[in-house]
Amino acid sequence: MPELPEVETIKEDLCALIVGSRIERAEVLAPSLIEQPSTDEFIHRLQDVGVSRAWRRAKHLIVELDSGDALVFQLKIGGQLLLVPPVEEPKTALMLVLYLDGDRRLFLRDETGFTRARLLGVAELEERLSSLGPEPLEEGFDAGYLPRKVGSRRAQIKPLLLDQKVISGIGNIYVDEILYDARLHPRRKANTITDVEWEALYTAIRQNLAAGVEHRGTTVRLYRDVLDRSGEHQNFLRVFEKHGRPCPRCEGEVVREKVGGRPTHFCPACQKEDGPGGGVGLESLW
Ligand SMILES: [Zn+2]
């Protein structure tokens, strides 16, 4: 699903293309899209409202309206927001059309049907976002944060990085690339990670997400920006879906295994489960 860099790219597109426009009306083609309020109220509150701001928090895309409401999208794996009419089949993938001034339309399509939208008041929005962890590309996220937050936990590092309450915006593609750069095995227990490794992980998080934003996202299959263009970051992946291919660092073979229920790609030669700091030794004390 779209992660921080993809949602950030879509947000930037919306800032450039629809902030300042008016939504004349909304047409809901897939009522399953609307989590809150009712579909009727959703349509009613989206009649003749101005778009005042677009921003991102974690993987949430937030479109603020001059009515005080915020239209919040959680784009799932097939979620696309398009200003150009979608021409691909199946047509049933179309979930929502926002009719804008100037005879333009913003289409939300998702052939998997998992994308969700909410229309929230100010307090509801605040409540919804309150449990999210820090934004990894913002100032408040420093090298000491992760060891402080999860450094004593015996949980595996990959599921911890995917937990949006721990840190915002990282999903299954970027996490594998981040752990590869930090030379951490995805099953490594957080309480065995050394100071030097936490530092490497911090750097890898910032570098991978910043590169993803710079390359306007990763299109493995379905991700598109608002003008229906693919991202470029898929050309820079080293391990994600590269199983059976040589590791670019050591020429060992990249493997795919399930970790925390998610398909996980890594190089067992560069990312040793016990780690250079002797994680297994510490762990065996227990
Ligand atoms: Zn390797």
Image: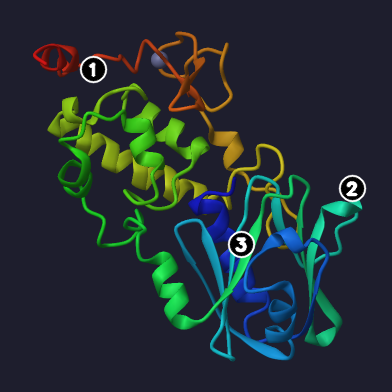
Q: In which quarter of the image is residue 190?
A: top left
Numbered disc 2: secondary structure? loop
- Residue 115 visible in rendering: yes
Seen from the viewer's position, the closer of residues 83 and 69 is: 69
Disc 1: which residue: 275
Seen from the viewer's position, the closer of residues 160 and 194 is: 160
Q: Is residue 121 above or below residue 286?
A: below
Q: Is residue 159 left or right of residue 147?
A: right
Disc 1 to disc 2, how far (Cα)?
47 Å
Give the image location of residue 254, x and y in percent.
49, 14
Which of pointers 1 and 3 lies earlier in the amino acid sequence?
3
Which of pointers 2 and 3 lies earlier in the amino acid sequence?
3
Which of pointers 1 and 2 lies earlier in the amino acid sequence?
2
Looking at this view, name the residue that lies furthest to the left: 285
Q: In this view, does 257 lie above or below 22?
A: above
What coloring was used for the rendering? rainbow
Q: Which mark identifies residue 90?
A: 2
Amino acid type at mark 2: Pro
Q: In this view, does 83 lie to the left or right of 252?
A: right
Disc 3: which residue: 10
Q: In which quarter of the image is the C terminus?
A: top left
Q: Quadrant of residue 175?
A: top left
Q: In which quarter of the image is the N terminus?
A: top right
Classed neighbour count for the residue bearing mark 2: other residues with Cα under 10 Å, few (<14), some (14–19), many (≥20): few
Amino acid type at mark 3: Ile
- Residue 22 visible in rendering: no
Q: Does the residue at mark 1 contact the one at mark 2 (Cβ under 8 Å)? A: no
Give the image location of residue 258, x and y in percent.
49, 21
Residue at image location 87% in from the left, 53% down from the top: 92
